[in-house]
Amino acid sequence: AQSVTQPDIHITVSEGASLELRCNYSYGATPYLFWYVQSPGQGLQLLLKYFSGDTLVQGIKGFEAEFKRSQSSFNLRKPSVHWSDAAEYFCAVGAPGNNRKLIWGLGTSLAVNP
Amino acid sequence: ETGVTQSPTHLIKTRGQQVTLRCSSQSGHNTVSWYQQALGQGPQFIFQYYREEENGRGNFPPRFSGLQFPNYSSELNVNALELDDSALYLCASSTGLAGGLTDTQYFGPGTRLTVL
């Protein structure tokens, strides 16, 4: 069965510092991989997604993620964090073929210090 | 701008009651998915509707049911509410041939349901 682990429940970084949010998945083949951001009172917004091809994926708001098959990971990165990036970040996994269901991690809460 | 709206924003019910939550998708989005997000958890897939037919379901009992209408609106109905049903309920719409995961889902802000 598919599963997603986000090892860090809460992360605090200083504004301007780099960021890496971790995501590990369990799946027998290459799944579809997603990162979403959720701000208070707002819906989930897709940051980026990976289906196949180039393992380094560029997303919106300056985020990128790298798929590493050998580590079953899809970590999210940003070189310089802005205060507006404070939010909850979710990694999600979907199985190609079972094209209706996403399995979500528990999320990582990001706080940004000025 | 996603254009997905949900109503009401907040709702309080008592155990055993029934509730209907509403979602208005973007025009042209023929697929809607519903998710339950308990406090401190990630969303859990409830079901998906495509062209007014249920198109996939997660591990939720039959007392969770839905409807999708031709005007791109949809409903989530929950009967016999239980305390554990307290959560944020999210709908997400997408366009595409069969609502596959390759289509971007646009989420509404959610309805916060509290069951007392």
Image (tube, coloured by chain):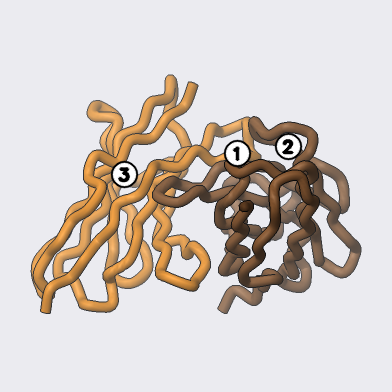
**Residue type of the residue flagged with mark 3:** Thr
Q: Position of residue B1 (x, y in %)?
A: 56, 79
Element type at mark 3: loop
Q: Chain of mark 1?
A: A
> Is A51 left, or right, of B100 in this rendering?
left
Tell us which disc is closer to us: 3 or 1: 1
The foreground one among A72 and B112 is: B112
* Percent of width and height locating residue B50: 80, 49
Q: Which residue corresponds to the image point at 49% horizontal and 21% vertical from the top-left?
A: A1
Residue identifier under label 2:
B56
Asked if both marks, 2 and 3, belong to the same chain, the answer given is no
- The local crowd at label 1, few if under 14, some if 14 to 19, many if 20 or more residues have their Cα within 10 Å, is many
- Residue B34: give its label: none
Left or right: A43 as drawn, with respect to B81: left
Mark 3 vs 1, N-terminal side: 3
The reply to whether residue A32 is in sight is no
Looking at the figure, which quarter contains the C terminus of chain A? bottom left
Label 1 belongs to which residue?
Answer: A101
Examine the image and state in which quarter residue A38 appears.
bottom left
In the rendered image, which residue does mark 3 sit on?
A55
- Name the kind of residue labelled 2 in the image: Gly
Tell us which disc is closer to us: 2 or 3. Answer: 2
**Left or right of B93 on screen, residue B30:** right
Task: Supply the letter of whichever chain is brown.
Answer: B
Label 3 chain ID: A
Instruction: Check whether the beta carbons of the residues at disc 1 and disc 2 lie within 8 A of each other.
Output: yes
- Name the spot of residue A104 as percent of width and height, x first: 46, 42
**Which chain does the orange colour mark?**
A
Regarding residue B32, the answer to whether it shows in the image is yes
